[in-house]
Amino acid sequence: MHAHKNRINDVWFHVLSFLIVVVWGTTFISTKVLLSNGLSPENIFFYRFLLAYLGIRMVSGKRIFAQTVKDEFLFVLAGICGGSFYFLVENYALKITLASNVSLIVCTAPLMTAVLTHLILKTEKVTRRLVQGSIIALLGVALVVFNGSFILALNPLGDFLSFLAAFFWGFYTIILKHVSNRYSTFFITRKVFFYGVLTILPSFLIRPLNMGSEILSHPVVWGNLLFLGAVASLTCYFLWNTAVKRLGTVRTTNYIYFIPIVTLIASVVALPEEEITLVALAGAALILVGVVLAGQRKKLIIPKCP
């Protein structure tokens, strides 16, 4: 009975993970709106995480510091890997290379997370099913990203930054798993927001923070910032951290493969000239098959080379 109840609870966490990536897959629209209204990527991240921090600070308790200096340092890294550096390298990659390149490369995060978790935490096995499922899902991502129009232009710096973003997110997820048994999800999420905001501040020495009341007073600006801060950051980061604690790093991160599908659908809704092709539909099917295969628990360990 207890095992059956746990399986039912796991189903709800899988649904929750999928709903989170649905939200994250639509955030590009809000970001593009804010960019078109004069806010830089640094500005958008700062206001987004600051709103999220202020929101969670009111309900996360009075505790300020972690139990040890080592844990506090891990929270600094979490704020960097899941916040400031992740968003900076991804946004600057978008500026110097094709969005399709960035989308495809960033979606290697689940596979990178599995490998890093196996190497660092020793808690996940790199199985044949995981590798096969990841390859199938990545192929599906490629079909969805290109959507019947294959354009791939190599840009070493832009592609490197995209891989760096995937690495940051994978490392962030590992940190979450490492500290989740000792701290509440509220505390962990609050620390991520705090150190995300703190570590983005040096960038404003190069490109000053836009604090113009005229821009920030526009309903379209503060409305989108509120969505990014309260929904995409505060709510989704808290729920994501909860899902990682329950399902583990690899099974949760596999849902990132679905983000390009959500982004494509959102593009079709927001931009009438966009359309979904049969190639993209085939890609969506491959992503679904790949995620299911990669998430299966059968332990067929990849043999090590002699």
Image (cartoon, rainbow, N blue to C red):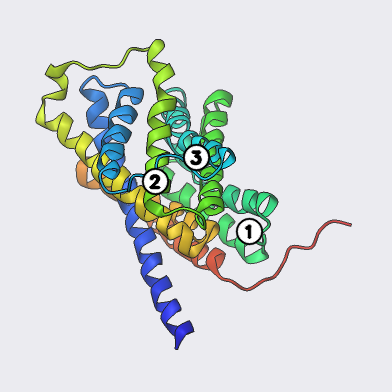
Query: Which callout, 3 or 1, points at the residue further toward the start of the chain?
Result: 3
Residue 118 vs 296, above or below: the answer is above
- Secondary structure under badge 3? helix
Query: Which callout, 3 or 2, points at the residue further toward the start of the chain?
Result: 3
Which residue is found at the position 61% from the left and 62% from the top?
130
Q: Amino acid at mark 1?
A: Val
Residue that lies at the very extreme toward the right in this rendered image: 306
Q: Which mark is drawn over residue 131?
A: 1
Judge by depth and name the residue closer to the eye, 133 or 181.
181
Labels in figure, total: 3
Say which residue label 2 marks.
Answer: 189
Which residue is found at the position 46% from the left and 64% from the top?
246
The CA distance from mark 3 to mark 1 is: 30 Å
Q: Where is residue 236? Give x, y as percent.
A: 33, 50
* Left or right relative to 278: residue 220: left
Which residue is found at the position 43% from the left and 47% from the top?
188
Q: Where is residue 305? Give x, y as percent.
A: 84, 56
The CA distance from mark 1 to mark 2 is: 30 Å
Residue 86 vs 144, above or below: the answer is above
Is mark 3 in CB contact (under 8 Å) with mark 1? no
Say which residue label 3 marks.
Answer: 75
Can residue 184 be seen at all in this image of the molecule?
A: yes
Q: Where is residue 49? Give x, y as percent.
A: 32, 35
Q: Where is residue 198? Give x, y as percent.
A: 41, 27
* Left or right relative to 217: residue 291: right
Is mark 3 in CB contact (under 8 Å) with mark 2? no
Residue 90 vs 215, above or below: the answer is below
Q: Amino acid at mark 3?
A: Phe
Q: Residues within 10 Å of mark 2 (few under 14, many from 20)?
A: many
Q: Quadrant of the C terminus?
A: bottom right
Judge by depth and name the residue closer to the eye, 88 or 161.
88
